[in-house]
Image (spheres, rainbow, N blue to C red):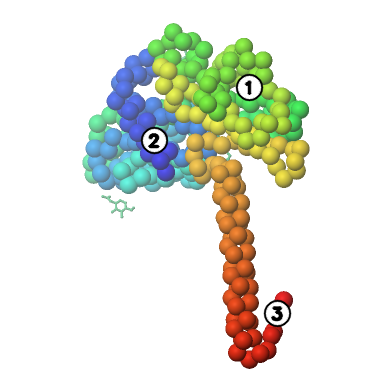
Amino acid sequence: MSDECRVCLLGLIFLSSLLTGISGENDAHVFISSGENVRLPCNNAIHDCNSTTWNYNRFRNSTAVELIGLGIKKKDTESHERLSLGSDCSLNIRNISTEDYGLYSCQQWTGVNRDQQEGTDARVYLHVLHVSSSQTEISAGLSVTLFCQFYSYPPVSCDDSDSSERIQLFWVNQAGVKLTRSDSRYQISAPDHCIITLTTTLLNEDDNREWRCEVTQRDQVKTSVTYTVKSSAQADSTTVIPVTDSPTAAGITTEEIVIVIAVCASFVLLLLALILWMMIRKKRSGVRRATDDSVVSFVG
Ligand SMILES: *[C@@H]1O[C@H](CO)[C@@H](O)[C@H](O)[C@H]1NC(C)=O
Ligand SMILES: *[C@@H]1O[C@H](CO)[C@@H](O)[C@H](O)[C@H]1NC(C)=O
Ligand SMILES: *[C@@H]1O[C@H](CO)[C@@H](O)[C@H](O)[C@H]1NC(C)=O
């Protein structure tokens, strides 16, 4: 919801930002975490989306794949089930995967035979951040490694702070403080090929602890993926559950559990109060009846 807006905003910000280092000035750059939904804008000069064609290129030399041809979705592409054309001719992709990064181009065709291109291609570069874990089920005392990878087209350097894009990867804690190699609890790899890993031995008190991988461009956070350590039903077993920014991708959060417990507790309290009130009422009416009829009847 709000994250989608943020993503749209991101796209718009990038549309107007200068990224002469890796592409043309009018190209949009969208950063997204895997599992989220994304909307790629088309500079629609024509509002009839039957004129719209979306092409996809992952590598510079690969031939473009047509995802949408003159408003009609192609059924033979890997991602077709997750694609839809927005009312403004934008391309919507659900549940982003690491396969989706690359260059998306929107074209609009006019003329009787739809053979004249209106304007130039609207180009959107999609960059994907993904976190995976060495283990899905882990317990205290065990070592876990979290891999955070940034999939980008064209490829960028994630460790060169002098390059014009200045793309950097970080692991941060709950407070947003960067985890560094000087912290004895964590082993943080130097970013290499846009992968940064965090290795640590899980402690009992790590339950609900969050570690977040962030990708920054010129010191601005573009997107992030949060990992939360969760206790499972068994007391000594913990599970690492990936939580992206998207609420749809998240599992049951601690807040939800707390709310459920609070609701149950208030319900029980209410029930107790009701029982007490009924008992008092019964007792009173019993006393009244006793005075009226000289018959004492106690129930329960
Ligand atoms: C666009 O496509 C729809 C559905 O195929 C069709 O009903 C409509 O007439 C088309 N519009 C134009 C302007 O071609
Ligand atoms: C793309 O093509 C150019 C020249 O055609 C070549 O120099 C380059 O190595 C190719 N790149 C890849 C990734 O294949
Ligand atoms: C999203 O895609 C992943 C694989 O990339 C899949 O495991 C998962 O079930 C998908 N989620 C939804 C909600 O479709």
Residue 119 visible in the snapshot: yes
Of discs 2 and 3, which sits in the foreground?
Answer: 3
Locate residue 74: give its quadrant.
top left
Q: Which mark is residue 6?
A: 2
Q: Which residue is mark 3?
A: 299
Q: Quadrant of the N terminus?
A: top left
Front-lying residue, 111 or 284:
284
Check the image and report above or below for 161 versus 250: above
**Residue at screen point 34% across, 16% down:** 20
Secondary element at image label 3? loop
Tell me the amino acid under the disc marked 3: Val
Quadrant of ligand 3: it is: top right
How dense is the environment of label 2, judged by Cα within 10 Å: few (below 14), some, or many (20 and up)? Answer: few
Image marks 1 and 3: residues in contact by CB distance under 8 Å: no
Q: Quadrant of the C terminus?
A: bottom right
List x then y, in percent, for residue 145.
Answer: 67, 25
Image marks 1 and 2: residues in contact by CB distance under 8 Å: no
Please tell me which of labels 1 and 3 falls first in the chain: 1
Q: How far is mark 1 from mark 3, CA to CA?
A: 66 Å
Image marks 2 and 3: residues in contact by CB distance under 8 Å: no
Tell me the amino acid under the disc marked 2: Arg
**Residue at screen point 71% across, 28% down:** 203
Q: Which mark is residue 198?
A: 1
